[in-house]
């Protein structure tokens, strides 16, 4: 407990950008991979603001050979370098050293902008080991350099220059970030999205590490984006013609493309001023309301569902894929990372723009309307038919539900979810060892006896018929898909305990695919883990060493004395391991090693694409992915 007096002398005032360096999570969400890439997104978004306001048409992003330095260049107006009247400093220096400084707080310099908070450039500067700004403006090159947020000198005027624009080159500070190496695939995907959202924009991505240069340009806009989303998801549309709309009114510019597919989920990719809003917001709410109302009106006016089940909003949204991009003059984001739009007026604006035109689209395109209505009615029938089956996998209460739990579940004594752990193991033999070796007070064991279904290829009906998966969901107690309720989850940790070989990895992959597609809330909450059982035991004298893979085994052998005598035991499966040994190496909370499975927001599109390619029905996509990524594979079990 802190002691001492609390007086005026206890108050700390952080000057300049010191607060950003002291508490970076308040500005970029964290110092992990997502936070690292957020620095680049801020600089790219500043360049995009020039594009959205008609002052730029080309952006070049360069990643250095070591993957730790980024450069963003645009052909916009160039950041002003003249003296700022209030501060007496160059406007360039003010922008890069002062929080909430910029030209986006009124409508004079920018009509719409993503960098509304005015913290982007200065925060990037504060969290960079080095940063250099080069400006082409007023006939000259202008340069200023910084180190950890502090200028190394004033703005220098260089050689005469043609045209205008800004180039920002920065190296994130390794003292702040856990890993300061950028992901080229993630960058390329984000940049391509920007070109979908800005017709006519060209973005060149130069990856010096891989020695590649890629040019992105999509003149079809959100319509092209929707095509790419459907292709990546390998979804089949129920009708070939999508609904596409572009509208602009006094306070809002809107672009939307949507279509219905045979998929069972809804996928809306939304953006505000080209910034992805992962957590949705009022613009998404407006679109959902417009779609619901337009489709229900069409069904009611044409009396198409008189004898069928009641049509609900979830039936209309099932299989809907959409790309929604809005430009708002004064967006109100939730937090500095801008993950959700909060402007209340935007919901009504989007609804009023989309609803009448979607109604008109359905009236004028009978074949599309018929296909959509058929899709909606089928979804309603499927919902009604699966209600009884789905209810069987919902948890009632932590205690009363025990009678309905799978018979093969070896449950724990504790009913406190935060203390309880569920180990999902493959086979009865492994389940037996785990059952004997566990701490039965807090650790439950669920052995899987049959084949785990590939959830990427299976229908909802097939999933509900698969005993292994329904037993798993029953044990978890939280339901799945639209019935998921985190409050009913019976275990705080769900741990996949499979053999440390390729077969075990395959089973873990199938289970993770199921969680990703049907229980994403568990991944978002950080509830899913991979256990790390040893594959090898190296015995030297009286000492035993454990290795999870070939590399760890070789590292252990390299440390043994030269000509030392040793024996290596390779475990064919967890069932071979004595219960006591399994507890000591894999189950004991004080000694084990667990890997938490999570999908950062920035990685979701790439992860979705990867799961579709590897686990989907198209062998060509799987082969292409393997050929492209084989060079980076590790721990291959041949």
Image: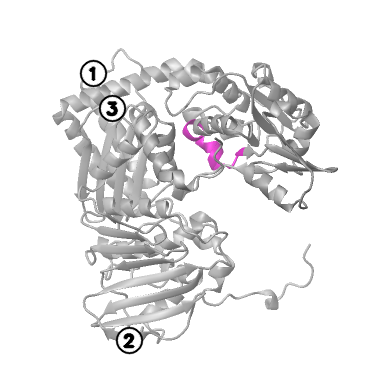
Answer few, some or many: residues within 10 Å of disc 1's Cα (few below 14, many 20 plus, some between 14 and 19): few
Image location (x, y in percent) of residue 608: 42, 40
Q: Which of 43 and 592 is in front in this view?
A: 592
Report the mark closest to the observer, 3 or 2.
Answer: 2
- Image position of 47 (left or right of 171): left
In this rendering, the answer to whether 554 lies above or below 92 is: above
Please indicate whether residue 512 sits to the left or right of residue 231 in the image.
Answer: right
Q: Identify whether 73 is placed above or below 512.
A: below
Residue found 56% across the figure and 66% down from its top: 174
- Residue 513 in percent (x, y) is at 49, 33
CA separation in Å, label 2 and label 1: 72 Å
The one of 539 and 180 positioned closer to us in this rendering: 539
Place of residue 38 in the rendered image (x, y in percent of width and height, measured from the top left): 45, 59
Q: Earlier in the sequence, mark 1 or mark 3?
A: 3
Q: Mark 3 points at which residue?
A: 296
Q: Which mark is residue 477?
A: none
| Tag in front: 2 or 1 | 2
Instruction: Magenta stretch: give its range.
Output: 516-529
Between discs 2 and 1, the one toward the N terminus: 2
Between the residue at mark 1 and the residue at mark 3, the CA separation in whole angstroms equals 10 Å
Quadrant (top left, top right, bottom left, bottom right) of the C terminus: top right
Q: How far apart are marks 3 and 2 (CA)?
A: 63 Å
Report helix, strand or loop for mark 1: loop
Q: Mark 1 points at which residue?
A: 303
Judged left or right of residue 216, residue 576 is right
Mark 2 lies on residue: 157
Query: Which corner quadrant of the image does residue 134 belong to?
Result: bottom left
| 209 drawn magenta | no
Q: How would you rate the neighbour count of disc 2 (Cα within 10 Å): few for under 14, some for 14-19, many for 20 or more?
A: some
Give yes or no for residue 525 being in the magenta stretch. Answer: yes
């Amino acid at each position: 407990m802190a002691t001492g007096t609390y007086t005026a002398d206890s108050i700390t005032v952080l000057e300049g950008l010191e607060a950003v360096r002291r508490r970076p999570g308040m500005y970029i969400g964290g110092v992990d991979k997502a936070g690292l890439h957020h620095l680049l997104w801020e600089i790219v978004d500043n360049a995009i603001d020039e594009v959205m306001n008609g002052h730029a048409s080309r952006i070049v992003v360069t990643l250095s050979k070591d993957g730790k330095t980024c450069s963003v260049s645009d052909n916009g107006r160039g950041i002003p370098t003249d003296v700022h009247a209030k501060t007496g400093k160059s406007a360039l220096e003010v922008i890069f050293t002062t929080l909430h400084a910029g030209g986006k707080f009124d409508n004079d310099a920018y009509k719409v902008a993503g960098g509304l908070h005015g913290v982007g450039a200065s925060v990037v500067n504060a969290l960079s080991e080095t940063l250099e700004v080069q400006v082409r403006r007023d006939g000259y090159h202008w340069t200023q350099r910084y180190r950890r947020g502090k200028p190394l000198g004033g703005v220098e005027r260089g050689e005469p220059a043609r045209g205008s624009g800004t180039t920002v080159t920065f190296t994130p500070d390794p003292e702040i970030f856990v890993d300061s190496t950028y992901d080229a695939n993630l960058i390329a995907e984000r940049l391509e999205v920007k070109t979908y959202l800005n017709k006519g924009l060209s973005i060149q991505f130069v990856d010096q590490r891989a020695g590649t240069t890629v040019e992105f340009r999509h003149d079809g806009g959100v319509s092209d984006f929707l095509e790419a989303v459907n292709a990546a998801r390998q979804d089949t549309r129920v009708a070939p013609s999508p609904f596409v709309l572009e509208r602009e009114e006094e306070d809002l510019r809107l672009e939307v493309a949507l279509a219905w597919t045979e998929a069972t989920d809804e996928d809306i990719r939304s953006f505000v001023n080209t910034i992805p809003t992962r957590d949705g917001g009022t613009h998404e709410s407006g679109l959902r309301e417009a779609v619901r109302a337009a489709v229900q009106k069409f069904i009611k006016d044409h009396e198409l569902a008189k004898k069928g089940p009641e049509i609900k909003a979830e039936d209309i949204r099932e299989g809907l894929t959409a790309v929604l991009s809005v430009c708002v003059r004064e967006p109100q984001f939730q937090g500095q990372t801008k993950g959700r739009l909060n402007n209340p007026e935007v919901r009504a604006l989007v609804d009023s723009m989309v609803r009448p035109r979607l109604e008109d689209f359905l009236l004028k395109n009978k074949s599309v309307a018929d296909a959509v209505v058929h899709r909606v009615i089928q979804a309603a029938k499927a919902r009604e038919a699966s209600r009884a089956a789905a209810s069987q996998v919902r948890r009632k209460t932590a205690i009363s539900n025990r009678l309905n739990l799978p018979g093969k579940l070896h449950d724990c004594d504790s009913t406190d979810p935060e203390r309880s752990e569920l180990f999902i193991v493959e086979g009865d033999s492994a389940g037996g060892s785990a059952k004997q070796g566990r701490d039965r007070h807090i650790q439950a064991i669920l052995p899987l006896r049959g084949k785990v279904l590939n959830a990427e290829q299976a229908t909802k009906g097939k999933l509900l018929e698969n005993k292994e998966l329904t037993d798993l969901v029953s044990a978890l107690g939280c339901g799945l898909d639209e019935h998921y309720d985190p409050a009913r989850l019976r275990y705080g940790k769900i741990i996949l305990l499979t053999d440390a070989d390729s077969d075990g990895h395959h089973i873990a992959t199938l289970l993770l695919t199921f969680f990703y597609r049907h229980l994403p809330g568990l991944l978002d909450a950080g509830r899913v883990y991979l256990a790390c059982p040893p594959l090898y035991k190296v015995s030297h004298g009286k000492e035993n060493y454990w290795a999870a893979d070939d590399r760890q085994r070789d590292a252990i052998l390299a440390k043994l004395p030269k000509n030392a005598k040793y024996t290596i035991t390779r475990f064919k499966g967890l069932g071979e391991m004595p219960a006591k040994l399994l507890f000591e190496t894999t189950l004991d909370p004080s000694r084990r090693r667990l890997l938490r499975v999570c999908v950062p927001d920035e990685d979701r599109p790439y992860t979705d694409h990867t799961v579709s390619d590897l686990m989907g029905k198209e062998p060509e996509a799987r082969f292409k992915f393997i050929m492209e990524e084989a060079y980076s594979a590790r721990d291959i079990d041949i």
